[in-house]
Image (cartoon, rainbow, N blue to C red):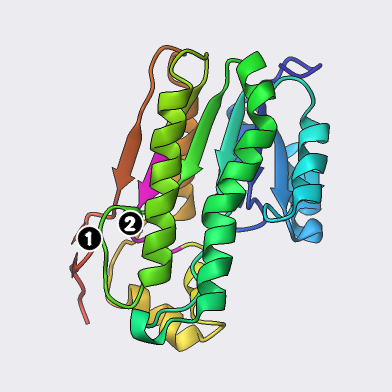
């Protein structure tokens, strides 16, 4: 608990999309939120809005992660490992291996680095670790090999961590969303090509929103301490499976 008796949460990748929505929802539910992200101007504005704190943090930087841990201190109630992303959408035969490395760095190594750094505080606080995975970590699809591989690795980190912490007072959950129309995700994947980004959601009446995922994060975090949700897979109703999406064009 923090000095003002609010439980303390860290949300990485909090500058936009699911991360920003999660920070707002947790603050509404009574948490003091440390919003961590690379874009300092955004998280400073967010922190002011939600009466939280902002820490500039690139999860691939050891120095930034250490600074985040120093800000957290000795106890932490909730870590939301949300920082991640997809870069590119080409077949494996044409893979941009630098983009693959970036995806592994942020989606896998970044999750491991932040978790490792904050784990003593989480154990002291009988905390909860929530990792933002993806349905891409459950089934492969064409032209997404790098992201699919990275999110499969994210899932493996979560499952391994849960086994290793079985005798510690820490819960470990993966939330694996399907189609979420969140700020910037598709646009980043397609290097700013708005037409390609829009095509991902074309004809889908109601893709998930960042607020939908934030609602699930909050629900997981506020279950009784003995209740662990190993994994939650969530898709919009229109997406029956990775390859089966109802579109009205």
Mark 2 surroundings: few (<14), some (14-19) or many (≥20) residues within 10 A: many
Of the 4 image quadrants, the one containing the N terminus is top right
Q: What stretch is highlighted in magenta?
A: 174-181
Is residue 176 magenta-colored?
yes
- Looking at the picture, how far across and down is residue 3, in whole percent? 81, 16
Tell me the element at label 2: loop
> Which residue is found at the position 59% from the left and 59% from the top?
105
* Label 2 to label 1: alpha-carbon separation: 8 Å
- Looking at the picture, how far across and down is residue 118, in whole percent? 67, 31
Of residue 101 and residue 237, the one placed in the foreground of this image is 101
Q: In this view, does 193 lie above or below 102?
A: below
Residue wearing tag 1 = 239
Position of 55 with respect to 212 (left or right) is: right
- Looking at the picture, how far across and down is residue 128, in whole percent? 53, 26
Tell me the element at label 1: strand
- Looking at the picture, how far across and down is residue 232, in whole percent? 33, 39
Q: Is residue 120 above or below residue 212?
A: above
Can residue 209 be spotted in the picture?
yes
Whichever of callouts 2 and 1 sits on the residue coming sooner in the sequence is: 2
Q: In this view, does 172 lie above or below 247?
A: above
Residue wearing tag 2 = 178
Is residue 114 magenta-colored?
no
The answer to the question of whether label 2 and label 1 lie on touching residues, with beta carbons closer than 8 A, is: yes
Position of 101 with respect to 91 (left or right) is: right
Mark 1 surroundings: few (<14), some (14-19) or many (≥20) residues within 10 A: some
Of residue 161 and residue 204, the one placed in the foreground of this image is 161
Of the 4 image quadrants, the one containing the C terminus is bottom left
> Which residue is found at the position 69% from the left and 35% from the top?
117
């Amino acid at each position: 608990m923090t000095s003002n008796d609010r439980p303390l949460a860290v949300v990485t990748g909090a500058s936009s999309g699911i991360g920003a929505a999660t920070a707002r929802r947790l603050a509404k539910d009574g948490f003091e939120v440390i919003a961590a992200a690379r874009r300092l101007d955004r998280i400073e504005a967010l922190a002011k809005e939600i009466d939280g704190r902002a820490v500039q943090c690139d999860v691939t930087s050891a120095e930034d992660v250490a600074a985040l841990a120093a800000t957290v201190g000795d106890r932490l109630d909730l870590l939301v490992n949300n920082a991640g992303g997809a870069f590119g959408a080409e077949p494996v035969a044409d893979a941009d291996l630098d983009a693959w490395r970036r995806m592994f760095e942020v989606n896998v190594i970044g999750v491991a680095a932040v978790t490792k750094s904050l784990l003593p505080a989480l154990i002291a606080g009988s905390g909860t670790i929530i990792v933002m995975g993806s349905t891409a970590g459950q089934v492969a699809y064409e032209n997404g090999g790098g992201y699919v591989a990275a999110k499969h690795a994210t899932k493996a980190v979560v499952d391994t961590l849960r086994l290793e912490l079985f005798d510690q007072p820490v819960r470990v959950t993966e939330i694996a969303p399907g189609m979420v129309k969140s700020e910037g995700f598709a646009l980043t994947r397609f290097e700013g090509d708005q037409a390609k980004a829009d095509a991902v959601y074309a004809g889908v009446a109601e893709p998930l929103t960042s607020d939908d995922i934030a609602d699930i994060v909050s629900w997981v975090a506020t279950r009784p301490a003995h209740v662990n949700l190993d994994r939650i897979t969530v898709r919009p109703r229109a997406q029956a499976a990775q390859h089966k999406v109802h579109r009205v064009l």
